[in-house]
Amino acid sequence: MLRIAQVLKSNGTQGEVLMSLLDIVPEDIDLQEPVFIEFDGLPVPFYFESFTPRGTRRVLARLTGVHSLKDADELAGRAVFADYFEQEEEEDLCGWQVLDQNGRPAGTVVTHEDIPGNPCLWLRKPDGEEVLVPFHEELVLALEEKTGTLTLSIPEGLL
């Protein structure tokens, strides 16, 4: 799981909390998926009942089961985690052929490296060497499920 936010404080008397986002913007959060907050060392799932961005790094939110000032105060200072949504996609890409921006073979996806804020793919190049390349949404030029081919804009010098 990836730490995506920190609960800063309660807000009002109806259970809303103010969260500060870490390395993620509000638009990247899947509101249909749960977030997790640890209690006694165990992740407890919560769903968003309301979610209102306050600038680019803060969110006013109401979570399931949190309906009072006392409940919200109990969350203050706690970290918020989420299953990184791209992780499943990256695992599904194992074995896919990767082409560079010029259509040349770059390698085959071996696995992914889940670095917070910087997802990467391990590629096995045609010569057998393995290299780590960034895997951001902005770098994906094409994704062909039928052929298992991924075209990436790979920064010069990485291959």
Image (cartoon, rainbow, N blue to C red):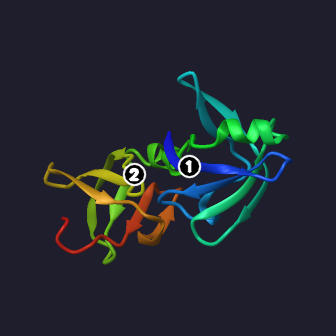
In screen coordinates, is 72 left or right of 99? right
Nearer to us in this view, 24 or 14? 14
Looking at the picture, which amino acid does disc 1 mark? Gln
For disc 1, the marked residue is 6
Secondary structure beneath dot 2 equals: loop
- Looking at the rendering, in which quadrant would you find the C terminus? bottom left
Q: Nearer the viewer, residue 155 or 52?
A: 52
The kind of secondary structure element at disc 1 is strand
Image coordinates for residue 120, horizontal then vertical, percent: 35, 54
| Residue farthest to the bottom, as pictured | 102
**Among the two numbered marks 2 and 1 on one chain, the one whose residue lies closer to the N terminus:** 1
Total labels drawn: 2
Residue at 53%, 50% (x, y): give it: 4
What amino acid type is highlighted by mark number 2? Trp
Separation of disc 2 and disc 1 at Cα?
Answer: 36 Å
Residue 110 x, y percent position in the rendering:
31, 44
Name which residue lies at 50% across and 39% down. 1
